[in-house]
């Protein structure tokens, strides 16, 4: 009789097509049962996950048979019911652990809650609603309304009370490259995410993340990039050799300033530019530029870098910001976007004069 052997790949697919049953706790070297050993006196000998479940006490109130007594039933049925309840309690405990793990992975923030907070009786819900109405505080009927404290950027931003459901709205700042950048401009500053509704001051503070971002968006889209377009238009209309404005066939702002404005329109020798002409722009060291470049080359570099960073929806790095302070100091109540706009206009006018 002819026997046909399947290929290795086919055999693997056939095996994987069948369900695989993994024994509970197969990765744990500690057991959940030891003959003749009392759990309460030897917890360290048992599996950690098993100890966590056995020690957990903060269950939802509907598991409390004193509050919610079980109807009179036969002992056999009662035992079956109690076993079902214990199994569900175990599922709840480990579901909560998974929730905490996912929450921490997403938001880098501990999920401070217990199972008993997941359920409230009708009386408790009505009482919470009454308290919220009388005090104008949040309604604590739902776990996602629970207030927790969070801090961002290693404590540079601290918020005492944030609803669990809103944590992501604040954690997003840690992933915003613009915030990551400007929060380093002044390491000593303590920031707040938004201006509270209770703010009564005449002058608005600058250490408000939302104010900085909102103003950045407005300056970027409505003012600074239009300044860039205006100077490019002026240069394009004045130069004779427009090919010198290109780089790899594309319009290039650095070439507009160096080859167009300075070289063609103003007749300045730009061959001695040590950094802009000889290095890739993103590799230029600001400290070296500060020590070795001419004042003219520094001004051109600043204009180009501000334009490039805003074009890419970013803030310039902290080292650049500190370098710019030697040319123009930021004012006490000035937002960063307004500062860069003012600096850009100043240096643009100096080059055009």
Image (tube, rainbow, N blue to C red):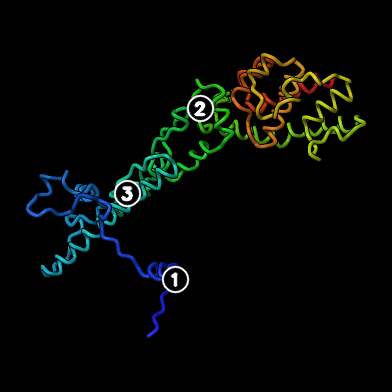
Q: Nearer the viewer, mark 2 or mark 1?
A: 1
Q: Residue 274: image x %, image y %?
A: 74, 20
Q: Residue 332: image x %, image y %?
A: 61, 18
Q: Residues within 10 Å of mark 3 (few under 14, many from 20)?
A: some
Residue at the farthest left position: 36
Q: Which residue is mark 2?
A: 191
Which numbered tag is attached to residue 32?
Answer: none
- Label 1: state its secondary structure: loop
Which numbered tag is attached to residue 7?
Answer: 1
Residue at the farthest bottom position: 1
Residue at the farthest front position: 1
Whether residue 133 is visible to the viewer of this picture, yes or no, is no
As drawn, 12 above or below 4: above
Residue drawn where x is 90% and y is 30% of the image: 239
Q: Report the front residue among 56 and 264.
A: 264
Q: Which residue is mark 3?
A: 97
Task: Check whether the beta carbons of the residues at disc 3 and disc 2 lie within 8 A of each other.
Answer: no
Q: CA distance from mark 3 to mark 2?
A: 32 Å
Would residue 22 be found to the left or right of residue 72 on screen?
right
Q: Nearer the viewer, mark 3 or mark 2?
A: 3
């Amino acid at each position: 009789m002819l026997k046909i052997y399947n290929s290795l790949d086919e055999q693997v697919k056939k095996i994987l097509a069948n369900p695989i049953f993994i024994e509970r706790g197969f990765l744990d070297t500690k057991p959940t049962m030891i003959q003749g050993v009392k759990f309460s006196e030897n917890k360290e000998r048992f599996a950690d996950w098993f100890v966590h479940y056995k020690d957990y006490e903060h269950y939802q109130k509907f598991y409390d048979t004193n509050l919610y007594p079980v109807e009179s039933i036969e002992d056999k049925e009662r035992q079956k019911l109690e076993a079902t309840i214990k199994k569900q309690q175990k599922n709840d405990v480990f579901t909560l652990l998974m929730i905490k793990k996912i929450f921490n992975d997403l938001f880098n923030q501990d999920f401070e809650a217990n199972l008993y907070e997941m359920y409230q009786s009708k009386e408790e819900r009505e009482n919470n609603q009454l308290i919220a109405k009388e005090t104008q505080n949040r309604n604590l009927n739902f776990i996602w309304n629970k207030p927790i404290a969070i801090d961002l950027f290693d404590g540079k931003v601290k918020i005492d009370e944030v609803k669990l459901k809103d944590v992501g709205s604040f954690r997003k700042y840690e992933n915003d490259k613009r915030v990551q950048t400007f929060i380093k401009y002044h390491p000593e500053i303590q920031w707040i995410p938004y201006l509270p509704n209770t703010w009564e001051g005449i002058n608005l503070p600058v250490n408000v993340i939302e104010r900085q971002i909102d103003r950045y968006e407005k300056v970027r889209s409505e003012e600074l990039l239009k300044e860039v377009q205006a100077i490019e238009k002026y240069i394009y209309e004045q130069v004779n050799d427009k090919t010198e404005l290109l780089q790899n066939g594309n319009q290039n702002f650095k070439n507009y300033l160096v080859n167009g404005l300075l070289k063609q329109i103003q007749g300045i020798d730009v061959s001695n530019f040590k950094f802009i002409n000889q290095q890739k722009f993103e590799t230029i060291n600001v400290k070296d530029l500060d020590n070795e470049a001419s004042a003219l080359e520094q001004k051109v570099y600043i204009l180009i870098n501000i334009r490039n960073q805003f074009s890419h929806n970013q803030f310039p790095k902290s080292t650049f910001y500190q370098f710019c302070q030697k040319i123009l100091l930021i004012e006490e109540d000035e937002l960063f976007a307004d500062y860069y706009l003012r600096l850009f206009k100043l240096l643009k006018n100096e080059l055009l004069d």
